[in-house]
Amino acid sequence: SYNARISQTIEGKDVLVVEGQLTNRSKVYKKYSITVEDDTATIRLKERHALPWEDNNYYYVGYDIPSEVKRIVMNKDVIWEDGIVITKEANEIYETKHAYVGEMPANGDTARALQIWKLGNYRTSLQTTEEPYGWTLEFIEPITNDTFFNERMTKSAYVILSLIENLGEISWEYTNGSEVITKTVTTKDATKALGRDVKEYSNSLLEFQRFLSQLYL
């Protein structure tokens, strides 16, 4: 995991600061190296197996970004591009982009990356006999806070519609304790609400990061 941010020197130069923990807890962080090829800088963390008395898997990177660098990669994640910090979450969610809603395992990857499970347990079903192709999430336990739940699901629906190329609409069904409620967001709904074709937000990771920031996700 990591947290990246931009700070500035007194001279106004951008510095990328990255802090986090090594994925393998049995290793310790030693140092880092940076190589630049074309306009991309790659950060490589140096690590080794921890000795019995060592516990230092936290790391810190400070990088004065040269003017020729437009993109920074670390551990296969793009963490900065054209002045924008790219979060770990954006990388993980964007990685689940796929062409067909009929690929249910891929759908599950997208839902997990968006952490929809935090809203409650759910079952899923597909509507793929004719267009618009749809995906329905049926929540099992009653939802007590409709406002928060529907706001979060609407934002998630926008993201899912962007990431699954042939998905035309996404629905969610739940009970608030007294009635069963179904909500549906179509690509047309999302495009109208966002002011831009929802599918275009996943054209690149940078655009996708801006999209998540716009949605406060």
Image (tube, rainbow, N blue to C red):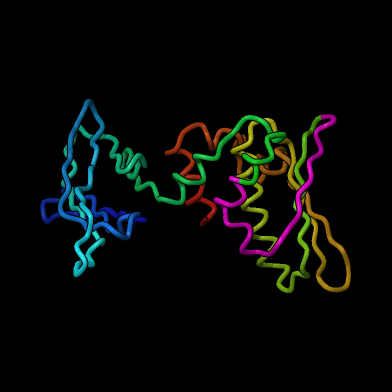
Q: Quadrant of residue 110?
A: top right
Relative to 203, say whether 107 is above or below: below
Q: Residue furthest right?
A: 179
The total number of labels drawn is 0
- Residue furthest front in the image: 52
Q: Which residue is situated farthest in the left direction here?
A: 11
Q: Is residue 110 above or below residue 36?
A: below
Judging depth in this view, the residue of 128 and 195 nearest the camera is 128
Q: Magenta residues? A: 109-130
Residue 65 x, y percent position in the rendering: 19, 42
35 or 29: which is nearer to us?
29
Q: Is residue 149 left or right of residue 175?
A: left
Q: Position of residue 75 (x, y in %)?
A: 32, 43
- Lateral position of residue 44 relative to residue 76, left or right: left
Residue in the image at 53% along x and 36% along y? 202
Q: Position of residue 94 (x, y in %)?
A: 50, 41
Q: Is residue 124 magenta?
A: yes
Tell whether 71 sits left or right of 121. Answer: left
Task: Please name the residue shown 81% across and 70% down the image.
Answer: 176
Of 60 and 156, the residue lying toward us? 60
Residue drawn where x is 32% and y is 38% of the image: 82
Q: Does the magenta segment cover residue 92? A: no
Where in the figure is residue 150, as x and y percent of width and height? Answer: 70, 61
Q: Residue at x 62, y 51 (%)?
A: 156
Q: Is residue 126 left or right of 196 when viewed as pictured?
A: right
* Image vertical order of residue 139 relative to residue 105, above or below: below
The quarter of the rendered structure image containing the N terminus is bottom left
